[in-house]
Structure formats: structure tokens, C-alpha cells
Image (tube, rainbow, N blue to C red):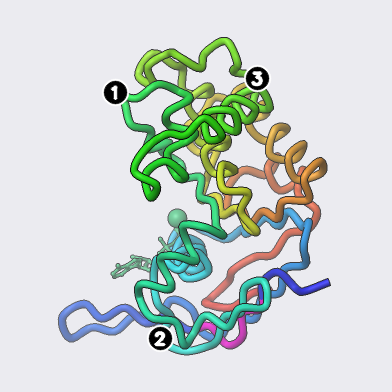
Amino acid sequence: MTRLLEARGIEKTFHNGDEDTQVLKGIDLDLEPGEMVALLGASGSGKSTLLSIVGLLLRPSAGTLTISGQAIDGLSEKERSHFRNTRLGFVFQFHHLLPDFTALENVAFPAAAPAGGLSRQMRERASELLGRVGLSDRADFGANRLSGGQKQRVAIARALMNAPDLVIADEPTGNLDRESADRVLDLMREVNKADGATFLICTHDESVAERCTRRITLLDGRVS
Ligand code: ADP
Ligand code: MG
């Protein structure tokens, strides 16, 4: 089976004025298909930076990245964004739902936006995903009428809309109470087991890490 992610020697330096900060100092990270990996580390250790690089939202200063056998380094900006939109899913701490759209429209958005509209197949897929996250009865609710935990479950369904190879989640439970956080986590684990979707989740939350299949920790710019 093709390895899902191969990151080699990833470095990232930010330049602020005349000050340079090297946040990542040579990260090697492999993910196999079906893994659910927790990325731990103190605040400011570079977790979000690494996730942004793996999610093709940010370019590394050095290092190479291969996702599902596709060498990423030589891709143009347009090819990177196509790969990101079709092969990766994202869940963030803040759900970023479109408040004036319904739950179903939000879930379908990653497919509907590039296509310029919502097809019947998209509607069916979004509806099935809302069922998976236990929100069939909320499909036609405006996103702003959902609770925090419900919004985050919609965000997970949205991340799965295009059947991504890899779901990247940055503190997905950071903004939720314990009960909603546990529900969101159990759901991610269920999806991971049932579909073999691969997850890379950065978190402060020990109970997130406990549910993952493996954990890695960022310390001083390196994986330990
Ligand atoms: P974490 O997610 O582990 O809390 P981050 O990846 O957000 O850490 O940040 C790691 C370090 O990189 C921090 O010191 C932060 O200030 C710095 N940093 C992150 N993004 C930028 C940026 N765009 N410009 C300059 N510094 C940044
Ligand atoms: Mg962060």
C-alpha cells in the first residue's frame, strides 16, 4: 500500500523584521493509510505550522513532502490548491461554517463551490455524511442555529465531503466542553475505523491523544 505521507527534513523559519525564528528544525514524519495520529507539544512548539505545511497551506523553508505517492515539492501554486481541495480535509478549532448556509449546504460546500452549484449527488452525499455525524434532523437548519458541538460535527462532515486521503485537524476540540469534545472525538475515531480515513490531529487534550492510534510530540523544533 502506498504510504500516505512522507515528510523528510521539514524546516520552517519565519522572518520578522530582522529577526529569524526557526520553528521546525528537520521533521521526518510518516503516516500509513488508516492511522490516526495525535501531534502533541507545548503552545508555540510549531504544531499548527507543521499542520499547515502538510496541508499545503504553507511552504516549508526546506524538506520534501510526498502525499499518497504524489511528490508535492515540484507542484505549482494552482496544482497545490487543486490537490488540497480534492485530496485533503480540514477541521479547525473554530468551525468556520458559513452562517447563512444550512448545515447540509455547509457540508456540501467543498464539492459545490468548485462546481459552482449543488448537484443532487452532492446533496445525497452531504445528507449521508450528516447522518454519520448524527445530525440528519438538522440538515436544513441555518448553521448559526446549531450548538458548538453540532457545528464542529458539521465541520467534520464537511471535511469528509470529498473523501479525502488525509484529514488534518488543528485543535478540533479546543473550543468545546468535555462532553461535546468526547462526542466529536468518538466520531472521528469511528470515521477513521469505518472508512480507513487517515487523521493527523494536533491537540493539547490528553483524551484526544488517548483515542488516537499513535502519538508524536514536537519539542524544540523536532519530533520526539
Ligand atoms: P503551536 O500550534 O504549537 O502553538 P505555532 O505553529 O502556531 O505553534 O507557532 C510556532 C511558533 O511560530 C510561534 O513562536 C509563533 O509565534 C511562530 N509563528 C507562527 N506563524 C508565524 C508567522 N506567520 N509569522 C511569524 N511567526 C510565526
Ligand atoms: Mg496551534
When the figure is inspected, residue 56 is found, relative to residue 106, above or below; the finding is below
Across and down, in percent, residue 130 comes to: 60, 25
Foreground pick, 170 / 126: 126
Foreground pick, 210 / 10: 10
Task: Tell me the kind of residue under disc 1.
Answer: Asp
Task: Tell me the kind of residue under disc 3.
Answer: Gly
Foreground pick, 141 / 22: 141
Across and down, in percent, residue 88 comes to: 55, 57
Residue shown at 57%/60% (left/top)? 41
Question: Disc 3 to disc 1, how far (Cα)?
Answer: 21 Å
Across and down, in percent, residue 148 comes to: 46, 23
Q: Which residue is mark 3?
A: 134
Q: Is residue 44 left or right of residue 36?
A: left
Q: Which residue is mark 2?
A: 61
- The quadrant of the rendering that contains the N terminus is bottom right
Magenta segment includes 7 = yes
In front of the other: label 1 or label 2?
1
